[in-house]
Image (tube, helix red, strand yellow):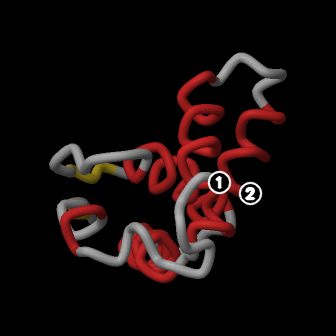
Amino acid sequence: MDYRQVDPPGGAHGTINADLAPLVAERQDPATALRRACGYLRNATALELAEWFERRYGDSGGTDLAAYEAAAELRSHPGPADRPYADPVYWAGFVYTGP
């Protein structure tokens, strides 16, 4: 699978990359997997994203400091129900190219 993206601000890049692997492993079409991962990012609340980054940090054995920092930033977000990555700048730069 090959996809290209423009580096989005915040933790969006890591979220998309980590979400893609299991979707493709499920033998989903890569374009569909990318669309689903972008949809998750677009619709996820600050609280959901904080929990996602906390799981990633825990799964890393406490070594993924970027995940830790992203979780802390999202936990301090003033509105836990807000969707901090709803703006297309965070997810629209991902493009799948391939068969």
Residue in view at x 57 percent, y 49 percent? 18
Residue 52 horizontal/vertical position (percent): 69, 56
Where is residue 7 drawn, in percent x and y? 21, 44
Q: Examine the rendered structure and indicate whether residue 4 appears above or below residue 86.
A: above
Q: Find numbered disc 1 in the image and state the secondary structure of the residue it sits on.
A: helix
Q: Amino acid at mark 2?
A: Glu
Q: For the residue carrying disc 1, how many other residues have a C-alpha within 10 Å: few (<14), some (14-19), or many (20+)? A: some
Taking the image as shown, residue 86 lies to the left or right of residue 28, namely left
Q: Nearer the viewer, mark 2 or mark 1?
A: 1
Q: 47 or 59, which lies in front?
A: 47
Q: Is residue 57 above or below residue 44?
A: above
Foreground residue, 50 or 63? 50
- Distance from the alpha carbon under mark 2 to that under mark 1: 9 Å
- Judge from the rendering whether residue 83 lies leftward or rightward of residue 85; answer left or right: right
In the image: residue 20, left or right of residue 84 = right
* Residue found at the far front of this picture: 78
Task: Tell me which residue sits at (46%, 70%) in the image.
Answer: 41
Q: Residue 41: which disc?
A: none
**To which residue does mark 1 refer?**
75
Residue 83 in the image: above or below residue 18: below
Q: Disc 2 on helix, strand or loop? A: helix
Structural crowding at the residue carrying mark 2, measured as other residues with C-alpha within 10 Å and reported as few (<14), some (14–19) or many (≥20): some
Q: Quadrant of residue 46?
A: bottom right
Q: Earlier in the sequence, mark 2 or mark 1?
A: 2
Residue at point 28%, 62% (across, down): 90
Residue type at tag 1: Arg
Q: How many marks?
A: 2
Q: Quadrant of the C terminus?
A: bottom left
Name the residue rendered at 57%, 58% in the picture.
19
Q: Which mark is residue 51?
A: 2
* Left or right: residue 25 compared with residue 40: right
